[in-house]
Image (cartoon, grey):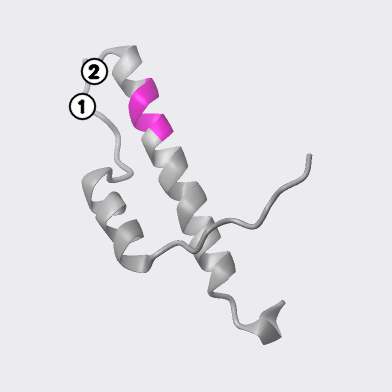
Amino acid sequence: MIYKTFPTVDKKFLEALEERYPDQCPPLGTPVEDIYVKQGQVSVIAFLRHQYKQQNLNILEN
């Protein structure tokens, strides 16, 4: 699989997403479908957080 470069992830954008979709367990009794959606949201934010960190590594650390 060939990956193209990923667009720059803005810190404020990432922080806003993390605030709106926090990585926390849903309440007991939450339907399974809603848990799947929540996990998807958290996975996307984790991916974006990783991209942000990679994009902001010091050139000497690479």
SS at badge 2: loop
Residue occupying the point 78% across, 39% down: 1
Q: In the drawing, does residue 5 fall left or right of residue 13? A: right
Residue occupying the point 68% across, 81% down: 61
Is 1 above or below relative to 53? above
Tell me the magenta residue range: 36-40
Q: Position of residue 60 (x, y in %)?
A: 69, 86
Quadrant location, the C terminus: bottom right
Q: In the drawing, does residue 19 fall left or right of residue 46? A: left
Determine the CA span between mark 1 and mark 2. Answer: 6 Å
Report the residue marked by disc 1: 27
Q: Which mark is residue 30?
A: 2
Q: In the drawing, does residue 10 fall left or right of residue 15? A: right
Residue occupying the point 39% across, 65% down: 10
SS at badge 1: loop
Q: Position of residue 56 (x, y in %)?
A: 53, 74
The secondary structure making up most of the magenta span is helix
Q: Position of residue 21 (x, y in %)?
A: 27, 43
Is 55 above or below relative to 30? below
Q: Report if residue 26 lies within the magenta region.
A: no
**Tags 1 and 2 touching, CB below 8 Å:** yes
Please state which amino acid type lies under the numbered disc 2: Thr
Label 2: how many residues lie within 10 Å, few (<14), some (14-19) or many (20+)? few
Q: Report if residue 38 lies within the magenta region.
A: yes
Q: Position of residue 55 (x, y in %)?
A: 56, 69
Total count of labels: 2
Label 1: how many residues lie within 10 Å, few (<14), some (14-19) or many (20+)? few
Residue 29 vs residue 55, the one in the foreground: 55
Please state which amino acid type lies under the numbered disc 1: Pro
